[in-house]
Amino acid sequence: MKLETLIDENYEKLNESDLYIWKYILHHKKECQTMSIQELASKCNVSHTTILRFTHKLGLQGYSEMKIHLKWEDKQQNSFDNKEIEKTYKDIEKTMEIMKERDFYDVFELVEKADKIYVYGSGAVQKNAAKDLKRSMIFGNKLIYVIEGREETNIILDALSSKDIFFLLSLSGNNLFMNEFAQKLKEKGVKIISITQVGNNELASISDISIQFYTHPISVGENKTKLYSTTQFFLINQILLLKYLEYR
């Protein structure tokens, strides 16, 4: 249990001196890991017995146990695996290899023949990438319409024809709403170009053309929140533009 939690749970027991001790520890956690009880007492202008009583009020057996908590919390906060940086480099390198090997003529043939081109992203990053794709393709004299939200997907369906194409951007390729929308596009005869992470995912299987990139989950913080590198969406946009300019 974190010291902050112990403070909250035992706050009513703490007096002014205790709160001063805690304030000092809170702002000097690293230093306190190696301080003796006498050194901390001197820093807080209290006796070492006052420090000891403070730890007992938190339900700890003594000062040594409190230092163990501090070291454990510090280890948790700094548990990031620095190998993740190299893995992310590799993800981008492998994505670039895919981009080098493809000429994307199949994509560009659809783009050239399309009456209208649309793009929709399933999440916050994907929506920004959708806007970036629109900006990029302006340099290729191609106008792409960005669908901003779920409500617009329902409205646009009635206006679509089999001569239109849709770029769909999804990290996992298994977003339920996105895939239901993709199925509706298929029923209308709209050609779909999906951009997702590498793997067998539903959106890729629905799409006429699948563009995939490498990424992997990175565990971050005490709760091991999953983070993915999504720079690849923007990288693909740039490569598509450059290869389209070459194609033309």
Image: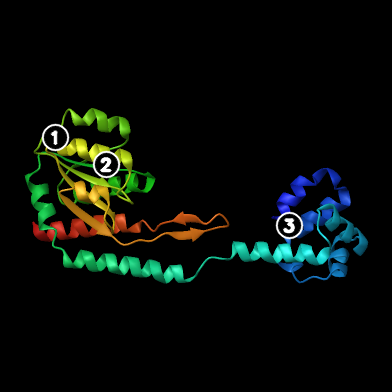
Which quadrant of the structure image shows residue 70?
bottom right
Q: Secondary structure at mark 1?
A: loop
Q: Secondary structure at mark 3?
A: helix
Name the residue located 28 percent from the left edge and 46 percent from the top edge: 130
Q: Earlier in the sequence, mark 2 or mark 1?
A: 2
Report the front residue among 229 and 116. 229
Judge from the rendering whether residue 58 lies leftward or rightward of residue 244; answer left or right. right
In this view, the mark in front (3 or 2): 2
Q: Secondary structure at mark 2?
A: helix
Q: Amino acid at mark 3?
A: Leu
Is disc 3 surrounded by few (<14), some (14 to 19) or many (20+) residues within 10 Å? some
Residue corresponding to mark 2: 179
- The reply to whether the C-beta atoms of the residues labelled 2 and 1 are less than 8 Å apart is no
Is disc 2 surrounded by few (<14), some (14 to 19) or many (20+) residues within 10 Å? many
Q: CA distance from mark 3 to mark 1?
A: 61 Å
Name the residue located 63 percent from the left edge and 66 percent from the top edge: 75
Q: Earlier in the sequence, mark 3 or mark 1?
A: 3
Residue corresponding to mark 1: 188
Is disc 1 surrounded by few (<14), some (14 to 19) or many (20+) residues within 10 Å? some
Q: Earlier in the sequence, mark 3 or mark 2?
A: 3
Report the front residue among 87 and 57. 57
Judge from the rendering whether residue 194 lies leftward or rightward of residue 226; answer left or right. left
Q: CA distance from mark 2 to mark 1?
A: 14 Å
Residue 203, placed above or below residue 78: above
The quarter in which the N terminus is drawn is bottom right
- Residue 213, given in percent of the width and then of the height, sits at 28, 60
Q: Amino acid at mark 2?
A: Asn
Residue corresponding to mark 3: 26
